[in-house]
């Protein structure tokens, strides 16, 4: 955790913890909340505005319920995950990186198609922020603009990447995440490298 507006989180610093319902494990990347200055900061406790983690699903199990929260799940590794909702909807996340957005109130059971999976998990409180997730190839430079008081997360799925020298940000290896928070002025970051990234944009409602 850092007091800087933007920083990088190596994969080996993610915190492993049990699911809320105790049926699985997750590696938390970061939880963020709005500070008194109106900017997103890394937070402790349950009063977060948005959160990133990697779920480790090793057996069929119900997901934890998160009322008031929307979430998006992305298959990172493994042969696939079936999501069976109590209302009858069934969706499958297949390799390489299928994703699905759904409400945290919905009761859903995860069923493994063929062995364990790891799944990127974005969650946000819908009454406080709105979030968008994009999967993009990284070929050469990528310019990321954050409007004032807007935040981005960059999760490197594969390959290697680095930010422009004037950013002060550490290089990224596969599995690492960068958190980019704009202050009162528009923030411009240039990411260079090769591989694939998940990009998360978060703005206030």
Image (cartoon, rainbow, N blue to C red):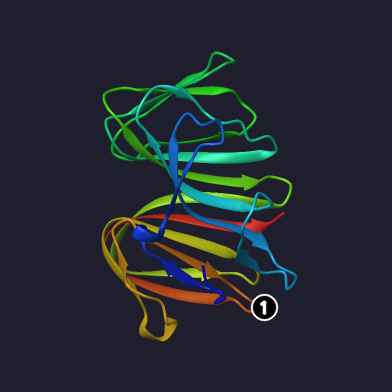
Residue at mark 1: 184
Q: Position of residue 1 (x, y in %)?
A: 51, 67
Residue name at image x 36 percent, y 54 percent: 136
Q: Position of residue 52 (x, y in %)?
A: 50, 51
Secondary structure category for the residue under label 1: loop
**Mark 1 residue crowding within 10 angstroms, few (<14) / some (14–19) / many (20+):** few
Q: Residue furthest top?
A: 88
The C terminus, quarter of image = bottom right
Which of 42/24 is in front?
24
Residue name at image x 61 percent, y 69 percent: 147
Residue 11 vertical placement versus 147 (above, below): above
Residue 189 vertical placement versus 78 (above, below): below
Q: Residue furthest bottom?
A: 166
| Residue 40 as seen in the image, left or right of residue 30 | right
Residue name at image x 36 percent, y 84 percent: 165
Evaluate whether residue 193 shows in this view: no
Residue 186 vertical placement versus 51 (above, below): below
Q: Position of residue 6 (x, y in %)?
A: 51, 73
Where residue 13 sits, quadrant-wise, is bottom left
Q: Position of residue 155 (x, y in %)?
A: 40, 57
| Residue 55 as seen in the image, left or right of residue 44 | left
Evaluate whether residue 70 shows in this view: yes
| Residue 84 as seen in the image, left or right of residue 197 | right
């Amino acid at each position: 955790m850092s007091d800087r507006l933007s920083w990088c989180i190596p994969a080996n610093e993610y915190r492993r913890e049990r699911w809320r319902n105790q049926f699985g494990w997750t590696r938390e990347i970061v939880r963020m909340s709005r500070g008194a200055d109106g900017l997103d900061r890394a937070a402790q406790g349950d009063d977060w505005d948005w959160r990133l983690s990697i779920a480790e699903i090793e057996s069929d199990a119900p997901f934890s319920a998160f009322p008031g929260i929307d979430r998006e799940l992305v298959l990172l590794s493994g042969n696939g995950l079936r999501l069976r909702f109590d209302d009858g909807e069934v969706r499958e996340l297949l390799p390489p990186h299928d994703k699905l957005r759904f409400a945290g109130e919905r009761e859903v059971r995860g069923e493994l198609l063929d062995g364990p999976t790891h799944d990127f998990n974005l969650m946000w409180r819908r009454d406080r922020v709105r979030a968008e997730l994009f999967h993009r190839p990284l070929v050469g430079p990528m310019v990321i603009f954050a409007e004032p008081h807007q935040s981005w997360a960059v999760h490197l799925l594969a390959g290697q990447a680095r930010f422009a020298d004037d950013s002060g940000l550490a290089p990224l290896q596969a599995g690492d995440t960068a958190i980019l928070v704009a202050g009162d002025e528009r923030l411009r970051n240039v990411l260079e490298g090769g591989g694939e990234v998940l990009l998360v944009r978060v703005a206030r409602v």
